[in-house]
Image (cartoon, grey):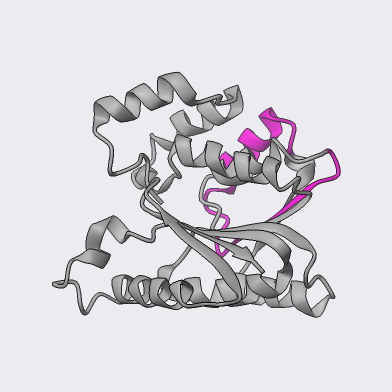
Amino acid sequence: MSSRTNQLSEAMSNWIHEHSLRTSNASANLFKETEQLEDWLMITSPEQLQFLSFLAVTLNARKTIEVGVFTGASALAVAEVLPEDGTVVACDVTDEYLPIATRAWDEASVSSKIDMRIGPALETLQELIDSGKTNSFDMMYIDADKVNSHNYFELGLQLIRAGGIIAIDNMFYGGQVADASFDEDENTVATRNLTIALHHDERVDFTLIPIGDGLALMRKR
């Protein structure tokens, strides 16, 4: 997660925010509340939130999955553009920030669209598979522990329909993936290995874009 696209100057980031964002009041209020937290930099940048919304609309998404919720900004961004019967299955291992998230979801009147699942996401995703939900989701956003990102992707690939999108955040890991001195950091190494695997995975179309802290996009073939 990253609070703004790292590759942009502050002036350019501010310009983009002023001239391109269509942020709802609920999202803006959530961002302000999250900024008061010690670890607020974990929130997804506003331009990336809008990009996720754009992807969901482009896909005509009805069913989506999110791994890693934090204060609920990305679940909110996607839920706001889903149809009334749309669903975001939101997975997080903790409910620490859930009161903040639910206030924002209630403000935006999207709480009915968000199916919050507290517990290890690997278990939640496997439960969805075991309950017959394979090939039924349109989009998945992964923004959680980096060591398990590849595992989340593999389970997600079973759940996403052909033509659906899986997005994985923090693929630059603060630039450490390109710094050879970070050869023993498990998160950096895991992210590098994931990039290599995705680059050569013939089951998906793949691109890596410099938004936020680096966003990988995979389209299931």
Residue 109 horizontal/vertical position (percent): 74, 31
Q: Is residue 35 visible?
A: yes
Task: Return the residue nearer the eye: 30 or 19.
Answer: 19
Residue in the image at 19% along x and 72% along y:
182
Task: Mark yes or no: residue 67 visible.
Answer: no
Q: Is residue 185 left or right of residue 206?
A: left
Q: Residue 116's spot in the image, x, y percent?
A: 69, 55
> Residue furthest toward the top?
18
Q: Quadrant of the C terminus?
A: bottom right
User: What is the x, y in percent for residue 145?
Assistant: 44, 67
Left or right, 139 with reference to 143: right
Out of 70 and 24, give the one closest to the viewer: 24
Residue in the picture at 67% in, 28% down: 107
Look at 83% across and 75% down and name the residue there.
Answer: 131
Reply yes or no: does residue 105 show up in magenta.
Answer: yes
Q: Is residue 165 above or below residue 39?
A: below
Residue nearer the viewer, 172 or 32: 172
Q: Is residue 80 magenta?
A: no
Q: How many marks?
A: 0
Hey, which residue is sitting farthest left in the picture?
A: 181
- Residue 128 lies, in percent from the top left, at 76, 72
Task: Judge whether 132 appears above or below 85 on screen.
Answer: below
Left or right? Give the position of 129 relative to 157: right
Which quarter of the picture shows residue 113? Answer: top right
Residue occupying image coordinates x 16% and y 72%: 180
User: Which residue range is magenta in the image?
Assistant: 84-110
